[in-house]
Amino acid sequence: MDQHDLDELLKRLEKPARYLGSEWNAVHKGWDQTAVRMAFAFPDLYEVGMSHLGLQILYGLVNAHPDCLMERVFAPAPDLEAELRRSGMPLFSLESHRPLRDFDLLGFTLQYELTFTNILNMIDLAGIPLKSCERGDDDPLVIAGGPVAANPEPLTPFIDAFLIGDGEDLLPEVLSVIRQAKVGTDTPSAGYLARRPPGAARWSRRRLLEQLAGIPGVYIPAFYCVEYTEDGRVQGLTALRPELQSRVRRRLAPDLNDLFFPTAPVVPLAEAVHERGMLEVFRGCTRGCRFCQAGMIYRPVRERDSRVLLRQAREIIDKTGYEDISLVSLSSLDYSDLDGLLPALGEQCTLSRTGISLPSLRVDSFSVGIARKLPGGRRTSLTLAPEAGTQRLRDVINKGVTEADLLQAVSAAAAAGWSAIKLYFMVGLPTETQADLEGIGDLVRKAQGAGRSARGGKKLRFSVSASSFVPKAHTPFQWEGQLPRQQLTERHAFLRDLVKNSGADYHWHDIKTSFLEASLARGDRRLAEVLLEAWRRGCRLDGWTEHFNFDLWQDSFRAAGLDPQFYAERRLSYDEVLPWDLIDVGIDRDFLVREHRRSLAGETTADCRPGACEGCGVCPSFGVEPRLAKAEVPSLNVRIHD
Amino acid sequence: MVEYRIEYSKNGRARWLSHLELIRTFIRALRRSGLPLVFSQGFNPHPRLSYGPSLGVGVAGLREYLDLDLAAAAPLPEGMEAVGRQLPPGLEIRCLLELPPAAPGIGKAVNCAWYRLTLPPEQSVDAWQQAVERLVDRSDPLYYKRPKDGKLFDVRSGLTACRLMGVGGRSEASSSSAAPTCGRGSIGEEPAFLDLLVDFGEAAAPLRGIVETLLLLAETAGCYEPARVTRMALLRQNGGLVNPLGERKQLWET
């Protein structure tokens, strides 16, 4: 697209800054000087995608390679989609504003089930056949990865290859095969067109997929067959080629210190949801909350060395100018070398007038005390997530937080000057009873009391946010069903009255959205038909309340002859084949069963960080060990369960 | 503490930034530049900056301004270079000036703006000429109703001068203290354009209102397109015209 066409398009859009591609640190590489050209496709709006660390990691990683190029594309907002459909112009990349069709491959990141229709929409707007089996040798390869690829089944007909696990080593291996497919060699050199050996033909799509299937961590769904029982359960999963493993093992990067990390991330022009430098302190979490998928599929914990983190922080600050830097991980204050990191980082940030933020705060006074001392740490509101209202239920979900932890954290926050506290809970957890909901009310009242006395009688503002439990693949709760919508609605209503009576605000996550999320999260291949129907009916940006249309989704399930409740609410049995059994994240199935049983018995399982191995199976199966920045864990960090 | 004024242009892709997006872009560029910024007090310190009047999304600006405080004097060419290196495409530093103590801030240093509207090639310059004459010759007020709040503006209030430059046109100028001046000139083969000198202030009509009214008077189909507008200069009108760098300017002098 030339400048004139681009201006003609931009003038019709509400937020043209989303599509400029001229951000600070955006990479504009020579198209003709690179052999492999990939578009990173984020299936949500610019403002969401630009807050995502994975995009920045892969963007920096691929563009650091002299022979490869990566550009970005985000889900178009409704105004851009309307323009593209009206004018017949294909969806384009941001950097060079080229049609996506011109790229060798298009890679989607899967962060949330409710972005699935955006993926179909983007493939269609790019002018690429929607289904993998309809694509020819000249169509780009369509790949996908990210946490939701832990159960990619509903998307299988639309995606040529899934990349399972850490992408830092895996994606370059895929790109290398693509280079080979295009030019007949995997040795990089300049001017790729000139060096295709005479007579060496571009590979067929089939041959390319066969080669890709040989890379550990690559899942080619077309090479596997799924059979179903008469009542709709999965009967069997079969590899269609003898050389294939029956399951695809996730890729794991054992040492984060060796990995590429983007210290010059693209700084958004249009305002993003989170605008801050991201410092990935560690990957993986060992607390073992039984509802948490991330806590299972990123094991084991792998911490970065504090010296590496300090160097990266300095570079990020210098190269972005961000006002804040965020310590990113599943529970950053579990980092074993806070002593080596925080004082020095605090000094760096004070000098450069940069704030430090913690995306999620562990529920205890120690964490609050630390957050208080960070530069820019005293924000208006502090968020804590006890998740459940009684000790019994917190033990069921293995959330190692006690009432005393919460009350001490609130007192510490109030004493430190915070005036507003947000509490997160989950409704509809397995075994939840009326007493657990009442427990949330009690806990909120006690927290209000603790806050008031710590502030000398002054009241704190409390707000309670509640989501609905969504069972996820590869977790101990994967066999549990979601509570029927009617019951969820009643429980949220009950809780709302309870919480409002004690003078706190109550916010709940839309129940229909959580229901749809649950039906897709444990879905199988047949759901692809539902996605197709929903997309055809106009479902887009389903994660946004203003765009979500549940009626259209219900119509789509009906049209496909499938029942969303079957997927969302059904309790699965231990002996049935699960649609995501093809994906091996490295956790022993027996561990998940054991965890599920312990959960129902109200037994907790210890964090493996201090050295107590609970036998999840990840370490032996990958031949790795948890990596802590500091072998000796400070005593404050050791959590002892009853 | 030393006060500085930056003169910059917002053009190319950067013309599509909103005022808020532009501010954030500048703040981060200044933070990266290493200049000794002065920060406000409080829990959320931010650099002490003040901006000239905002530009709409799509409107380019050739001479825009930004005042900033620095903790120590910065050598000028190096300071300019340091910020310039950090700006994304479309934003360029034209000049960095140390302000004398107690100099009026950018908000007070300007009270009018010179806008240039490039006319679409398919529209008749004669029709525009006619519209401009009708507007200038009118004795009673001509109202524009702002859609967002229904506020009425007399389109002529605040419009101090205008001129139309078209292919092979004749030159004509009228001038009085009460009415806007209006001229027409020839510019060879360049696209025709309309220059407008517009006052800021409560009663002054927004540019969109002026352009849309002219389109009505010209009996021409079309709408206000921000991307056809360039703010050529920000000025202070007080007897003569002075720009924020303290330079005296003639009308329509760049």
Image (cartoon, rainbow, N blue to C red):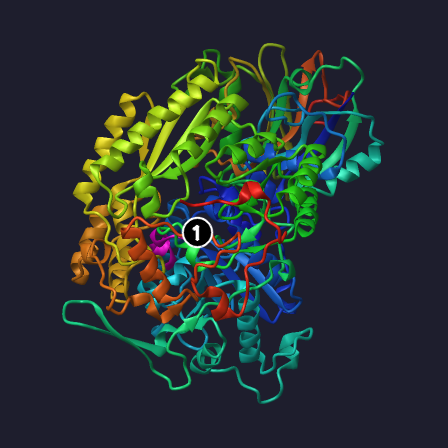
Q: Is residue A352 above or below residue B114?
A: below
Q: Is residue A116 magenta?
A: yes
Q: Is residue A530 magenta?
A: no
Quarter of image, res B78: top right
**Residue B24's spot in the image, x, y percent?**
60, 34
Give the magenta part as a residue range. A110-119
Image x and y of residue A408, in percent: 46, 29
Give the position of the C terminus of chain A as an image quadrant: top left
Type of residue at label 1? Ala
Q: Is residue A36 above or below residue A350?
A: below
Identify which residue, A349 or A61, lies in the foreground: A349
Q: Is residue B122 visible?
A: no
Determine which residue is flagged by label 1.
Answer: A606
Residue at the image point whose x is 38% and y is 33% from the top: A403
- The image shows residue B105 at horizontal and vertical percentages of 69, 17
Instruction: Say which quarter of the image contains residue A447.
Output: top left
Residue furthest left as drawn = A230
> Is residue A565 found left or right of A470 in the rendered image?
left
Vertical side of A205 occupied by B25: above or below: above
Secondary structure at numbered mark 1 = loop
The secondary structure that dominates the magenta segment is helix
Q: Is residue B2 visible?
A: yes
